[in-house]
């Protein structure tokens, strides 16, 4: 039942934001509020559990990519930068603002994850530098530029939201960050 509660809560958050009620959740599950409160003592505790599950899923995606031996180090970085934010598509800026306003402790947990959980990407970027697969850049600055870029994608007012899928936008961001905007000299010569 616990997994069903979390899954339905996640669905309701996508549908209604954090304004869903425990009555909404109980009705969607075909159960009573009493049953819900047997699992979670409050809506805050439930939202915190959803955030923790969400973070665990993102970390698992990251681990799966990191441990994928068929990818080289540069491909791993690119996959992480494209795959992880796609999993976070639910968390647009509007939802993040609601989370912060109504469930501050859960927001702090998620915010810390978003800002601080870059150790694997940073290690891979440093490995890329050592292997001379990327230029001698500052990996921390690269990550901050990347975060700034994806924050724009999750902004509800993002002007290109309906022209491109999130995946297309993320792939373009990663392409520009990795390859720049100048044309390849060899391509220009042909």
Image (tube, rainbow, N blue to C red):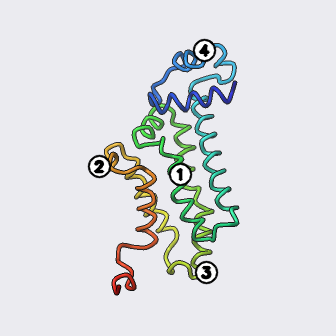
The residue sitting at 31% across, 44% down in the picture is: 157
Q: Residues within 10 Å of mark 1 (few under 14, many from 20)?
A: some
Among the 4 quarters of the image, the one containing residue 96: top left
Q: Earlier in the sequence, mark 4 or mark 2?
A: 4
Measure the alpha-carbon separation of dots 4 and 1: 34 Å
Q: Secondary structure at mark 3?
A: helix
- The residue at 52%/70% (across/down) is 139
x and y percentages locating residue 176 in the rendered image: 40, 68
- Quadrant in which the C terminus is drawn: bottom left
What's the residue at 57%, 59% (across, down)?
80
Q: Around disc 3, counting alpha carbons within 10 Å, would you say few (fewer than 14), some (14 to 19), or many (20 or more)? A: few
- Quadrant position of the N terminus in the picture: top right
The extreme left residue here reads: 159
Q: Of the residues under marks 3 and 1, which one precedes in the sequence? A: 1
Spatial CA distance of label 3 from label 2 is: 38 Å
Q: Which residue is mark 4?
A: 30
> CA separation, marks 4 and 3?
56 Å
Q: Secondary structure at mark 1?
A: helix
SS class of the residue under badge 4?
Answer: loop
Q: Which mark is residue 114?
A: 1
Name the mark nearer the viewer: 4 or 1.
4
The residue singled out by tag 2 in the image is 159
Number of marks drawn? 4
Judging depth in this view, the residue of 49 and 154 nearest the camera is 154
Q: Earlier in the sequence, mark 4 or mark 1?
A: 4
Q: Which mark is residue 130?
A: 3
């Amino acid at each position: 039942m616990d997994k069903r509660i979390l899954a339905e809560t996640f669905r309701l958050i996508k549908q209604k934001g954090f304004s869903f009620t425990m009555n909404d959740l109980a009705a969607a599950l075909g159960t009573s509020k009493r049953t819900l409160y047997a699992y979670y003592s409050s809506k805050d505790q439930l939202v915190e559990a959803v955030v923790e599950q969400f973070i665990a899923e993102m970390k698992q995606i990251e681990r799966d990519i990191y441990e994928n031996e068929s990818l080289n180090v540069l491909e791993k970085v690119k996959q992480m930068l494209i795959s992880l934010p796609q999993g976070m598509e639910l968390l647009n800026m509007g939802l993040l603002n609601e989370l912060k306003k109504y469930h501050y402790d859960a927001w702090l947990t998620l915010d810390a994850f978003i800002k601080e959980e870059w150790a694997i990407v940073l290690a891979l970027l440093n490995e890329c530098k050592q292997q001379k697969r990327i230029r001698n850049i500052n990996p921390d600055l690269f990550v901050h530029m990347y975060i700034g870029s994806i924050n724009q994608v999750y902004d509800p007012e993002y002007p290109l939201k309906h022209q491109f899928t999130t995946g297309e936008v993320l792939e373009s961001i990663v392409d520009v960050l990795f390859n720049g905007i100048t044309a390849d000299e060899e391509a220009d010569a042909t």
